[in-house]
Image: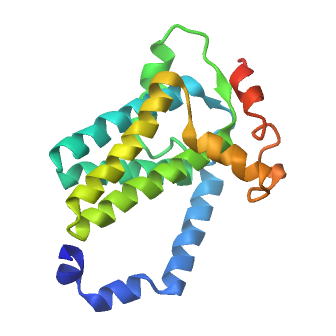
Amino acid sequence: MRWVSRVGHASLNTSLNPTNLLNILLAFQLMSKRFPFPHPVNETSARLVAAGVVVMGTAYSLSGAAWVLLPLIYGFLARVTTGPAFSPLAQLATKVITPRIAIQHRMVAGPPKRFAQFVGLLFSSTAGVLFLLDLGAASRIVAGALVAAALLESVFAVCLGCIMFGWLMRLGVIPQRVCEECNNLQLRSTAGV
């Protein structure tokens, strides 16, 4: 209850005001239009970003140092809303490291990767909220789950958020028009440059 006791219930209620939330969503939509998420995405860059998430998430899970959650949450929020444009980790991966790796880079669909970033935002934000509610152990467990998913992406190119995206498309939750080639994970795994 640390956050509530410092901020107070009045601030909490006004920050959750539907008008404020609508304004925030509109701002995100404008940012997304101005800085669209890339499509296709260089999988090498995505895997490097995931490796950075593994490092930060592991640092938090082992230490419990809450300040590590701030760049983690910010990074996911930045990547969901603007792609790599305002994420220092994504900028490092896409502009500095990836160009120096001499391999044939594979391009993959952007919408599933954006969805995966959103799932990462949910996990990292949940870890942050749990920490603020003095549920440190639960917070570290959620961060550990995020690390496990990011490790699968960075080491084995297994994107759990992308797989969830495909399932949601098949179930009709995500319309087919969002990503025509995304509903076939086999197509994703055989895509070339």
Of all residues, the one furthest to the bottom in this rendering is 10
Type of colouring: rainbow
Relative placement, left or right, of 134 versus 77 is left
Please indicate, yes or no, whether residue 166 appears anywhere in the rendered image.
Answer: yes
Q: Position of residue 137 (x, y in %)?
A: 22, 56
Q: Judge whether 185 appears above or below 17 on screen.
A: above
Please indicate, yes or no, whether residue 37 appears anywhere in the rendered image.
Answer: no
Q: Judge whether 142 appears above or below 157 on screen.
A: below
Of all residues, the one furthest to the top in this rendering is 102
Q: Position of residue 64 (x, y in %)?
A: 18, 50
Quadrant into which the N terminus falls = bottom left
Query: In this orientation, which residue lies closer to the viewer: 84 or 137?
Result: 137
Residue at 40% x, 45% y: name it. Answer: 146
User: Residue 166 is drawn in which quadrant?
Assistant: top right
Relative placement, left or right, of 66 versus 27 is left
Q: Judge whether 74 appears above or below 29 on screen.
A: above
Query: In this orientation, which residue lies closer to the viewer: 187 or 94?
Result: 187
Query: In this orientation, which residue lies closer to the viewer: 28 or 111?
Result: 111
Q: Position of residue 190 (x, y in %)?
A: 73, 20
Residue at 69% x, 35% y: name it. Answer: 109
Residue at 61% x, 55% y: name it. Answer: 32
Relative placement, left or right, of 68 versus 98 is left
Residue at 22% x, 75% y: name it. Answer: 3
Q: Judge whether 171 appears above or below 51 on screen.
A: below
User: Residue 60 is drawn in which quadrant?
Assistant: top left
Quadrant into which the C terminus falls = top right
